[in-house]
């Protein structure tokens, strides 16, 4: 017997996600060096970035503003807050402490709604600074263990981050994937981050545990190095099964940090929590408290764009699809929902426009909304079949627009009238006796085969709806 | 604050602070810290329940800089002053034994 | 020797050449520096060059500013671009900052001539300058005695005439105590009055830069130059400060001078006697003496020696051998940290890093650091109440006159007690200064500490100027 999400027995998965996102500021969190990915090593440095003796941090106003956008988009409360020092030694951490927010974060108590409406709680979304980057040389090819030495680049040190900490409300690997995808959409919508997992500007750690219903949550492991939406699901599924195997064989899960290895598809122990971290947090004396005014919060809120969920709802409302349908998800994710609505505003059929945009607009072509509108009108009026319409859309895309009617005429497209359809339908029934019998017996599925046969005979000129109508009439 | 600090705790603190102290230094530090902490126990007599901690002397808040680039440091000058550097980066021995 | 104000006036008018002023000071340095060791670095060439450019500016009709041609000694924990800045520590030996501290920029804009970087207790941790990795500084009044600390080098440099004025940093008394022991004026301004950008941190919430001078007026002039808001320091107070040089002429008529009746005992009788005379002097000058209580004063020492080391343990973590300063090689980075820091830091610095790390660590935070922050609030609030009744308070700056080398032995606590009267102002953020007020035992200088409320530097300087005048008007010794 298998539980939800493919877990054996009654095992229940419990996941919380910690997502670090680099903010899209021009400069660093506490100094005026550029916040820019991909520059020559150690070219975006200054006394603060390098932790030079005597250097002092000053907070970047825009970083706070972007962090507030994230908080508001995640339904958080914005609170007066402070900065702490998190003390630990690591060569890519210039001051040997990270300036972060500890017991008084900027954003608290929000939620993110998954596309199906499930709410995942957001515990906090706080501001902190990023570290530099170490690259390991010698030994076993670029890995930290067994390397001969490492080189450090501090360009990334001091880049502003927001760490978004979810509550352990996620119950399936699929939900985790949806959470990260939705979060990414929100971050892009509010222009707080470019959220590129492959460049590290969005980094996901997963806290994974398993338990049986009615029992307390199990011991959790933190999974690091999950660098794509796909690997989030894989890593969580692997880790859940690893923990279940341990528990079912009478062992215990050790609280530890584990590293996801994409190549072997497993998680590996990075460090145990036995030698407990002692970060000696204390208030950063070089910074003062941050307390955004109500006016500032209101202004940020007022300037927030429509978020993906609302855009999907609006698109769904206009087109009749479900808000979490693939078409709504894909088109909003590509940012083409405004375009679909514009086709409607230009007199077209938004439902047909949605289908064409979802199917054919992956490369974000430029087609004037009025041109697509005309095409969808022809479809609805029955002067073009769906198949013909596809061909015309391809032409519109290739030419950056055009008159759909002229293109259709040039291609010799005209939908078959009911008179021409009758003989073709009869022929299809004759050639597909079995399907016809099933259809007459009430098996709706059989209709597809009959319609398909007619379409084939008509060489795509028949209109699917019209064929269905004729079939229904003939069935009686 | 009553129990005297032990050499084990002092050794652990030295590891946290990344100070390689000799056994003699650990021993001496243990005695000195214990004496100091004994002296510092004078504040245990104070009633502080209703006192808010004070981390900074002058009350300021919302101090910002604008998000504008200013000239930074010259990489060659900085790397020339580093203990070890190559290929435009700071060089360090293998990173192991660091329990983050 | 001429005062800083006289030098600047002379240089600005063209009557005095900055190069001659520098040469006179270099000559004095040449004579006594080998014996005193006030400097980690005498910047002979740079000082001559900068004096020459000031003279050239004057010759061309320009105005170099209110400190034109004034030789100044900088404590060696203030970053000077391209000039070694060591904190008197092996871990920073030879390090040349690639940037200037804000005060260095302000001094240059005011026409001051930096003549050298002065010795200090390593990372400003100490009260005698004996903790310097480069050897102690000697007190110009008696070279068998300490100059105080941690800014002992700047205090000695000004007392010995090596520089017209100097800058120190004061975290628990590191300007006021050496000023007292060397017989010069030393000022710790209100926290946030002077930018800390480029001051190598000891304890960030306590550190303040302030002047040393041979007169209250020179100290006022120097503080007028270096004070003011700096956008590079988030804790810098965003206000315009009134001219202190103007304030000192106002006298003390009607000023309320507080006596702390529950001040911790422990000062030597010769010191206490001078403080009593100081009350008399201010009363004679027209001030009113009032009694105030600061019952938590005595707990300042404990709060300070938990808070300052805690912040220091974090501030000094950056000396890890990765980006600058000393590295002792080891097989891996973690091992390199341990041996580098063990080799680079002296005993007192290690002791405070240990104490501070302990006070912040899991399980001890509430009992030590957390509690110390509450005591800090208590002390601050009590001072605030006292300043409702008094404009300034008088106390000893140091419990004793300058003491012989090694006098505090191996007992860190004995040394820490040197700061008992100066520490509370750092905790509360209030300003304080030491004014030379006659002599005590062995004819050594005694400093009287004048304390005042937040941003009440004008009243503090008025009282200090009155004490300075009183010394020449029958209240000296």
Image (cartoon, helix red, strand yellow):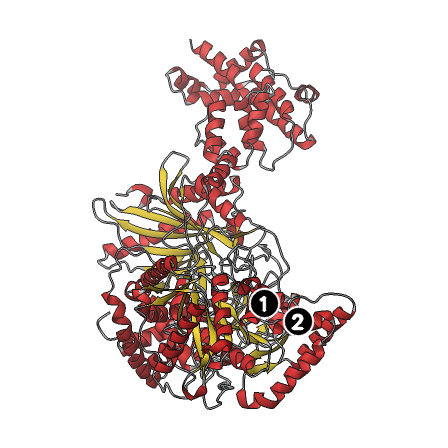
Residue A121 locus on image (x, y percent): 35, 42
Residue situated in front as seen by the camera: B28 or A129: B28
- The secondary element bearing badge 1 is classed as helix
Pointer 1 or 2: first along the chain = 2
- The secondary element bearing badge 2 is classed as helix
User: What's the chain of the residue with tag 1?
Assistant: C
Q: In which quarter of the image is the C terminus of chain A?
A: top left
User: What's the chain of the residue with tag 2?
Assistant: C
Residue named by callout 2 = C8
What residue is at 60 percent from the left and 60 percent from the top?
A44
Residue B71 locus on image (x, y percent): 64, 60
Q: Looking at the rendering, which quadrant does residue A49 occupy?
A: bottom right
Q: Horizontally, is C303 left or right of C334 in the view?
A: left
Question: What's the CA distance linking mark 1 and mark 2?
Answer: 10 Å
Residue A110 locus on image (x, y percent): 38, 41
Residue situated in front as seen by the camera: B9 or A231: B9
């Amino acid at each position: 017997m298998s539980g939800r999400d493919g877990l054996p027995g009654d095992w229940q998965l419990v996941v919380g996600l910690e997502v670090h996102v680099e903010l899209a500021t021009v400069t660093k969190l506490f100094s005026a060096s550029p916040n820019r990915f991909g520059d020559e090593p150690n070219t975006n440095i200054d006394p603060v970035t390098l932790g030079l003796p005597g250097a002092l941090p000053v907070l970047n106003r825009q970083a706070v503003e972007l962090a507030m956008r994230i908080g508001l988009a995640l339904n958080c409360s914005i609170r007066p807050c402070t900065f702490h020092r998190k003390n630990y030694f690591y060569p890519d951490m210039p001051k040997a402490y990270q300036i972060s927010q500890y017991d008084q974060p900027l954003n608290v108590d929000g939620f993110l709604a998954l596309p199906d409406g499930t709410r995942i709680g957001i515990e906090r979304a706080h501001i902190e600074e990023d570290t530099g980057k170490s690259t390991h040389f010698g030994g076993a090819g670029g890995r930290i263990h067994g390397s001969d030495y490492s080189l450090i680049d501090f360009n990334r040190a001091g880049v502003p981050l927001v760490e978004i900490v979810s509550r352990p409300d996620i119950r399936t690997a699929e939900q985790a994937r949806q959470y990260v995808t939705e979060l990414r959409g929100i971050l892009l919508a509010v222009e707080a981050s470019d959220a590129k997992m492959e460049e590290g500007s969005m980094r996901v750690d997963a806290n994974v545990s398993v338990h049986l219903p009615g029992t307390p949550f199990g011991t959790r492991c933190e999974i690091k190095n999950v660098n794509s939406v796909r690997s989030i699901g894989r890593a969580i599924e692997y880790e859940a099964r690893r923990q279940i195997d341990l528990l079912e064989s009478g062992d215990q899960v050790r609280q530890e940090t584990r590293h996801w290895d994409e190549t072997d598809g497993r998680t590996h122990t990075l460090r145990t929590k036995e030698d407990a971290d002692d970060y000696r947090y204390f208030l950063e004396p070089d910074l003062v408290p941050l307390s955004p005014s109500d006016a500032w919060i209101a202004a940020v809120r007022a300037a927030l764009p429509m978020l993906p969920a609302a855009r999907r709802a609006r698109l769904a409302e206009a087109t009749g699809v479900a808000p979490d349908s693939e078409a709504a998800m894909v088109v909003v994710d590509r940012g083409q929902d405004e375009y679909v609505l514009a086709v409607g505003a230009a007199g077209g059929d938004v439902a047909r426009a949605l289908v064409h945009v979802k199917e054919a607009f992956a490369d974000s072509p430029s087609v004037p909304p009025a041109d697509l509108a005309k095409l969808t009108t022809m479809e609805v009026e029955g002067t073009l079949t769906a198949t013909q319409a596809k061909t015309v859309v391809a032409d519109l895309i290739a030419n950056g627009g055009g008159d759909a009617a002229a293109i259709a005429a040039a291609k010799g497209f005209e939908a078959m009238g009911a008179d021409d359809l009758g003989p073709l339908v009869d022929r299809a029934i004759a050639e597909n006796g079995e399907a016809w019998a099933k259809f007459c017996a009430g098996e709706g599925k059989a209709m597809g085969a009959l319609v398909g046969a007619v379409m084939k005979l008509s060489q795509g000129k028949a209109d699917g709806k019209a064929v269905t109508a004729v079939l229904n009439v003939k069935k009686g | 604050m009553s129990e005297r600090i032990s050499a084990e705790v002092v050794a652990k603190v030295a590891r946290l602070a990344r100070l390689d102290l000799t056994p003699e230094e650990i021993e001496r530090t243990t005695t000195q810290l214990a004496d100091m902490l004994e002296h510092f126990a004078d504040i245990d007599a104070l009633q502080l329940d209703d006192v808010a901690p004070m981390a900074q002397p002058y009350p300021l808040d919302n101090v910002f800089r604008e998000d504008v680039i200013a000239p930074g440091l010259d990489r060659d000058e900085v790397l020339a002053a580093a203990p070890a550097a190559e290929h435009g980066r700071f060089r360090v021995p293998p990173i192991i034994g660091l329990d983050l | 020797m001429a005062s800083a104000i006289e030098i600047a006036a002379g240089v600005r008018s063209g009557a005095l050449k900055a190069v001659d002023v520098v040469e006179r000071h270099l000559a004095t340095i040449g004579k006594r520096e080998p014996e005193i060791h006030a400097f980690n670095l005498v910047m002979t060439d740079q000082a001559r060059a900068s004096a020459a450019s000031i003279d050239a500016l004057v010759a061309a009709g320009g105005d170099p500013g209110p400190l034109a041609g004034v030789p100044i000694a900088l404590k060696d924990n203030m970053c000077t671009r391209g000039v070694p800045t060591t904190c008197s520590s092996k871990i920073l030996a030879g390090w040349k900052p690639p940037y200037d501290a804000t005060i260095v920029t302000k001094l240059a804009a005011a026409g001051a001539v930096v003549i050298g970087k002065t010795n200090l207790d390593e990372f400003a941790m100490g009260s005698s300058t004996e903790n310097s990795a480069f050897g102690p500084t000697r007190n110009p009044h008696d070279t068998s005695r300490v100059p105080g600390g941690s800014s002992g080098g700047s205090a000695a440099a000004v007392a010995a005439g090596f520089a017209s004025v100097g800058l120190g940093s004061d975290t628990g008394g590191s300007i006021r105590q050496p000023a007292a022991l060397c017989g010069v004026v030393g000022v710790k301004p209100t926290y946030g009055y002077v930018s800390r950008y480029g001051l190598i941190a000891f304890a960030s919430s306590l550190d303040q830069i302030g002047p040393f001078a041979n007169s209250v007026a020179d100290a006022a002039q120097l503080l007028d130059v270096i004070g003011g808001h700096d956008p590079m320091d988030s804790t810098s107070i965003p206000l315009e400060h009134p001219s202190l040089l103007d304030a000192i002429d106002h006298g003390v008529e009607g000023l309320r001078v507080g006596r702390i009746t529950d001040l911790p005992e422990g000062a030597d009788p010769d010191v206490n006697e001078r403080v009593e005379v100081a009350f008399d002097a201010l009363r004679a000058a027209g001030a009113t003496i009032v009694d105030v209580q600061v019952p938590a004063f005595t707990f300042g020492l404990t709060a300070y020696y938990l808070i300052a080391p805690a912040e220091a343990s974090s501030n000094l973590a950056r000396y890890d051998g990765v980006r600058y300063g000393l590295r002792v090689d080891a097989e891996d980075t973690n091992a390199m940290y341990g041996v580098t820091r063990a080799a680079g830091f002296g005993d007192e610095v290690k002791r405070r890093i240990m104490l501070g790390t302990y006070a912040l660590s899991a399980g001890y935070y509430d009992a030590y650091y957390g509690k110390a922050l509450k005591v800090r609030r208590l002390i601050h609030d009590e001072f605030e109440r006292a300043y409702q009744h008094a404009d300034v308070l008088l106390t000893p700056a140091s419990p004793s006159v300058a003491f012989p080398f090694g006098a505090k032995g191996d007992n860190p606590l004995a040394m820490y007690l040197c700061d008992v009267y100066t520490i509370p102002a750092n905790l509360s953020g209030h300003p304080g200064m030491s004014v030379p007020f006659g002599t005590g035992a062995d004819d050594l200088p005694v400093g009287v500490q004048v304390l005042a409320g937040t941003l009440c530097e004008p009243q503090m300087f008025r009282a200090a100027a009155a004490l300075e005048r009183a010394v020449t008007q029958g209240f000296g010794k």
